[in-house]
Image: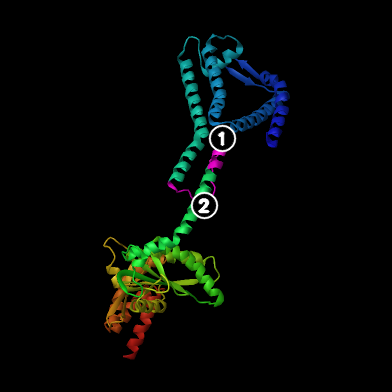
Amino acid sequence: MKMSTKILLVLFILVTIPALVLGGSIFAGIKATENGFVFDFDTKGIIAIVLSIISTILGTILYVKFLMSLSLERVLFFSSIPMIMIYGAIMFLIADLSNLNNNLAISVRSVLNLSPDNDYNTILWAILVTILFVMLLSVNYFFICKPMNKVEKIVSRLGDGKVKENKLQIGGSKQFKNIEHSLNKINNNYKEKDNTLKRADLPRKEYRQLTRFFGKASIEELERGLEVKKKSTLMVIKLECSERTLEGDYKLVDSYLNVIVPIIKRFGGFVIKYLGDGIVVVFQRSEDALDSSLSICRTVKVKNKSTSQKFKEKIAICTSNVGFKLKTESKELEIATKEYEVLSKIDKIISFLHSKVIFTKSCLDDLPLRYKFAYRYLGSINNYDGNDILIFEKLDVYPRDVVSKLVKNKGLFERGVICYDDGQYQKALDYFQENIRSYPDDKAGYVYYNNAKDKVSSQ
């Protein structure tokens, strides 16, 4: 027995004994009349009432502690016994009350509106007491069996491998505490083995992803040194900081990449090159690249709140038949220079226009029809073969209020860009002037406005 339980037991005995001794004062203060009861307690009666209340509270606590030490079937039995006994006693009194003629019985009959000649009210009171008894019994069973429902859910989740909590909690009696302890041991063993398997399977998993990407049975089937063409979506993610600290900067970039790379993998991409201040990523589908860019921007925003140096993400995306080579020294992929040149140009435009995510028209054309997102036309860049590549800005990576304003002015902005591309600089200037008048914080709009203004001035 715990020390706290022993103290409660001693207090219960010390309070209950005088409460029983003075108990007669309580009954003496309750006086029966023909119309009910009159309460007239003296000092001893009041003291007896207070002691009885304290004794009842302490007794209830001790009784609950006693129940918590039992198994489930015994808890159900011992918790039901007091209610059944009280219910039986009340039902007996209600049934026999009409035959009693003492002052107490007459007062009770007056309060309950009972009559020896009319059994109707007696039946109603019996039904009411029975309903109350059933309700109390149901509530009692509900709380006692509640831990069993938790056990069922936890066991089900353990079976499916979905338990993420570090510590499982069930509550209830001592039996459930033992079950809780055992389930926590099972959960910890499961997590430890699962983490071990994940660590052991990580290299093989990356290789399987690589070979599946090229439609090969194994990585050995990829001829080293031979360029392989594959329609893919490439993404270059760079992290830019205004306050660079050289030696410490790379460690900080790594801390950002540690939270970005899992996002890439979650969306089906894999990293093929580290750039020091960023990474090059390959996706099979354009929509996966665009979806991951949104998560990356949100993650960088959250990460910036926990660091003194704030990084700005720059994400360039293009889709084409990419040329891949497998390095001879290691099983690492490298992409053809031509595609990387396009991404490098987009990266410079991102810095110039103060954007976050820019993608090419080939990426836009590769999206399924059902794919919906906010974007706008930014203009064109020269490709390595002399052709123009149309580029677009992903808008929903910005805060919601900013997105709504950019989308609202999308028509103005895009008409300005088209006029600028066609050499109609005065028209472009008018569109961009109206655009920044509507939304002054549009940084790309300001850049275009200043460029158009310079062009008009030089004509």
Residue 421 % position (x, y): 29, 81
Residue 92 % position (x, y): 53, 15
Q: Is residue 161 magenta?
A: yes
Quadrant (top left, top right, bottom left, bottom right) of the C terminus? bottom left
Picture layout, residue 421 above or below residue 292: below
Quadrant (top left, top right, bottom left, bottom right) of the N terminus? top right
Q: Nearer the viewer, residue 236 or 135?
A: 236
Taking the spot 48% from the left edge, 28% from the top edge, the residue there is: 135
According to the image, label 2 marks what residue? 192
Q: Secondary structure at mark 1?
A: helix
Residue 265 % position (x, y): 41, 62
Residue 34 shows in the view: no
Q: Is 232 left or right of 247, judged from the image as shown?
A: left
Instruction: Give the number of the mark in front: 2 or 1.
Output: 2
Going by the picture, which residue comes out furthest to the bottom?
A: 458
Q: Is 208 left or right of 197, judged from the image as shown?
A: left
Occupied quadrant, residue 374: bottom left
Check disc 1 and give the amino acid type.
Gln
According to the image, label 1 marks what residue? 175
Range of residues picked out in magenta: 160-182
Q: Nearer the viewer, residue 29 or 337?
A: 337
Taking the spot 68% from the left edge, 23% from the top edge, the residue there is: 41
Q: Nearer the viewer, residue 71 or 404?
A: 71
Q: Is 136 left or right of 233, judged from the image as shown?
A: right
Taking the spot 48% from the left edge, 58% from the top edge, the residue there is: 199
Q: CA distance from mark 2 to mark 1?
A: 26 Å
Disc marking residue 444: none
- Mark with earlier residue (2, 1): 1
User: Are the residues at dot 2 and dot 1 in contact (C-beta closer than 8 Å)?
Assistant: no
Residue 173 % position (x, y): 57, 35
Check disc 2 and give the amino acid type.
Glu
Q: Nearer the viewer, residue 76 or 62?
A: 76
